[in-house]
Image (tube, rainbow, N blue to C red):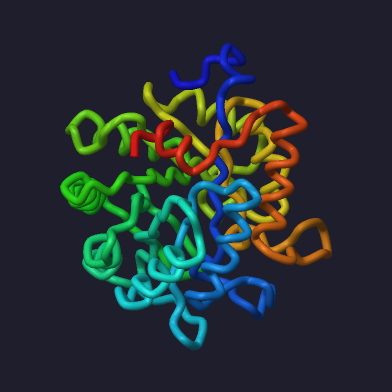
Amino acid sequence: MPYEGYSDYFEKKLIISVATTGGHHGKEANPNLPEQPEEIARDLKACEEAGASIAHIHARDGDGNGTKDVARFQAIRDAIDEYCDDIIVNFTTGGGGIWSREERIAPILETEPRPDMATVDLGPINFGQTRTAVNTREQNEEYARAMLDADVKPELELFNPGHIPEMEHLVENDLLEPPYWCTTIFGMQNGTPAHPRNVINFADNLPEESEWQVLALGRHQLPLTTSSIALGGHVRVGMEDNIYYRKGELAESNAQLVRRTARIADEMERPVATPSETREILGL
């Protein structure tokens, strides 16, 4: 199992991912949430300076609606290359129940340069009353194989421990290369309940050679990402997952959330990884 206690805690660099935008709420929820390419890239520049090394990217159209238009992803990639130094670009393939399998992976395969990483959602997720993102094993094999061929590293999104066998299936069929990059997700509708004990359980059951980060929604973001720091894991923050800095106070920017994480990590004596160090940790 990947979690072995504190044997290398003080030497292990902390990877901070930032999810700036997402595909659900927008400026109506927090006017500081970036939606347009240059706006996202400016925000990411500040996030990189604050300590983030991975940028998780969703695209919006000119009206702020979610889109899988390759040209919009290309515009974001171009803006990131203009504004940022070396931040790792990670495109989402999310959007099940809205876009087809082909539309969801097209930005990963058709932008230039291709992203460094892209997500693979390892199982079903419910949204609201009527929408389910199915994310079948067949689809996950297809995405993992395409990313392997394109030299794009998968970020494996696990919404509950029942998705671990789906990850193991990809490992056993040589569709993933170690180290495996895993996002353990807490507080979603039919995902894992948000509690520190569940972070430990998740980490204990991931396959060997896994590097893992915690994504927790809303008010759970701060306590559960801090739990991950203490356990030797990594963290994802950002306004895709949490629009508040504290109760009743909207986040001023994604960089504000990154700075807090870096400050906590410093107090806990976990050094924060630079983008180049993250590339080395994850074998990019």
Q: In the figure, residue 224 lies in which quadrant?
A: top right
Quarter the C terminus occupies: top left
Q: Nearer the viewer, residue 151 or 23?
A: 151
Task: Determine whether, in the image, residue 278 is placed left or right of residue 118.
Answer: right
The picture places residue 72, in percent across and down from the top left corner, at 37, 76
Quarter the N terminus occupies: top left
Task: Determine whether, in the image, residue 268 is placed left or right of residue 65.
Answer: right
Task: Determine whether, in the image, residue 151 is placed left or right of residue 157.
Answer: left
- Against 187, is 209 above or below? above
Asked whether residue 5 is in view, the answer is yes
The picture places residue 246, in percent across and down from the top left corner, at 80, 56
- Against 223, is 5 above or below? above
Task: Determine whether, in the image, residue 277 is placed left or right of residue 156.
Answer: right
How many numbered discs? 0
Which residue is painted at 46% across and 51% down in the image?
Answer: 86
Q: In the figure, residue 12 lies in which quadrant?
A: top right
Asked whether residue 137 is in view, the answer is no
The picture places residue 36, in percent across and down from the top left corner, at 51, 78
Which residue is painted at 59% across and 33% down in the image?
Answer: 198
Q: Nearer the viewer, residue 204 or 113?
A: 113
Which residue is painted at 67% across and 48% down in the image?
Answer: 221
